[in-house]
């Protein structure tokens, strides 16, 4: 593998320098560029082509989600990992819908950075274990649709809500990727949902219900 160019975007210089130091210890990273805010990051991105970026979610001026949308438009092949100090996962589904492939808690950066890198460079998505995925109460219509799912479909949908790929779900449940795809198609049909991101958002909203249903 050719050495990778990483872009670190964070308005806290101490954290930014610490993350850069960790990245420079990874043999896969050949160059690291840094920016202290979203506007500077976008200016850099128009001149350079990083392979991956670590993007702070909360910054002065343009916030992380706004910058992420521009990142995806300007460099659609760049892998973007969101950095956040908040563990409530409030913006997680929106970040993934905008093209992020990772969601890393700043408190986890020292211990989980290389695991995060391994995961996203293997073309999978990463979410810090400490992120709390909140469940929103369902409407009567949604609850009725959920009741149509089989236990196997509930297990698959629960893992979709953990941002696992079909291959990862297959490995977790000891079934084939084709079976996972069939389950996903049946789930979408029963729930009346089209699109990967909409299915993921639905799964995250109903995480607790799905967890309980999968354990029955």
Image (spheres, grey):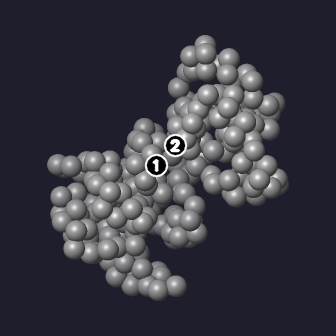
Work out whether residue 193 or residue 139 is closer to the camera in this orientation and state it.
Answer: 193
Q: Earlier in the sequence, mark 2 or mark 1?
A: 1
In this picture, residue 155 sits left or right of residue 74:
right
Q: Residue at x 53, y 53 (%)?
A: 127
Q: Residues within 10 Å of mark 2 (few under 14, many from 20)?
A: some
Residue that carries the numbered disc 1 in the rendered image: 96
* Percent of width and height locating residue 205: 54, 31
Residue 33 against residue 81 in the figure, above or below: below
Residue 60 against residue 55 in the figure, above or below: above
- What is the CA distance from the residue labelled 2 to the residue labelled 1? 8 Å
In this picture, residue 191 sits left or right of residue 150:
left
Work out whether residue 77 or residue 154 is closer to the camera in this orientation and state it.
Answer: 77
In this picture, residue 200 sits left or right of residue 34:
right
Q: Residue at x 58, y 49 (%)?
A: 163
Residue that carries the numbered disc 2 in the rendered image: 197
Label 2–label 1 contact, CB within 8 A: yes
* Percent of width and height locating residue 73: 32, 57
Q: Nearer the viewer, mark 2 or mark 1?
A: 2
* Percent of width and height locating residue 5: 37, 78
* Residue 60 seen by the camera: yes
* Residue 15 seen by the camera: no
Q: Residues within 10 Å of mark 1 (few under 14, many from 20)?
A: many
Residue 213 occupies quadrant: top right
Q: Residue at x 34, y 64 (%)?
A: 75
In this picture, residue 79 sits left or right of residue 33:
right
- Mark 1 lies on a secondary structure that is helix
Residue 175 against residue 116 in the figure, above or below: above
Q: Which mark is residue 2?
A: none
Q: Quadrant of the C terminus?
A: top right
- Mark 2 lies on a secondary structure that is helix
């Amino acid at each position: 593998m050719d050495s990778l160019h990483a872009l670190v975007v964070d308005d806290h210089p101490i954290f930014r320098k610490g993350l850069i130091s960790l990245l420079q210890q990874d043999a896969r990273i050949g160059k690291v560029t840094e920016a202290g805010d979203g506007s500077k990051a976008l200016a850099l991105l128009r001149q350079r082509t990083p392979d991956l970026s670590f993007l702070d979610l909360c910054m002065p001026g343009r916030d992380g989600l706004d910058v992420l949308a521009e990142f995806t438009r300007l460099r659609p092949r760049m892998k973007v990992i969101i950095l956040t100090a908040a563990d409530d996962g409030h913006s997680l589904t929106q970040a993934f819908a905008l093209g992020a492939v990772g969601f890393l808690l700043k408190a986890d950066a020292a211990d989980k950075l290389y695991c995060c890198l391994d995961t996203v460079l293997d073309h999978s998505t990463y979410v810090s274990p400490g992120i709390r995925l909140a469940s929103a109460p369902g409407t009567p219509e949604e609850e009725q649709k959920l009741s149509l799912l089989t236990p196997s479909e509930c297990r698959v949908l629960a893992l979709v809500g953990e941002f696992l790929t079909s291959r990862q779900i297959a490995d977790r449940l000891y079934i084939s990727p084709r079976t996972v795809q069939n389950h996903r198609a049946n789930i979408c049909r029963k729930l009346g949902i089209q699109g990967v991101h909409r299915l993921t958002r639905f799964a995250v909203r109903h995480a607790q219900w799905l967890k309980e249903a999968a354990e029955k």
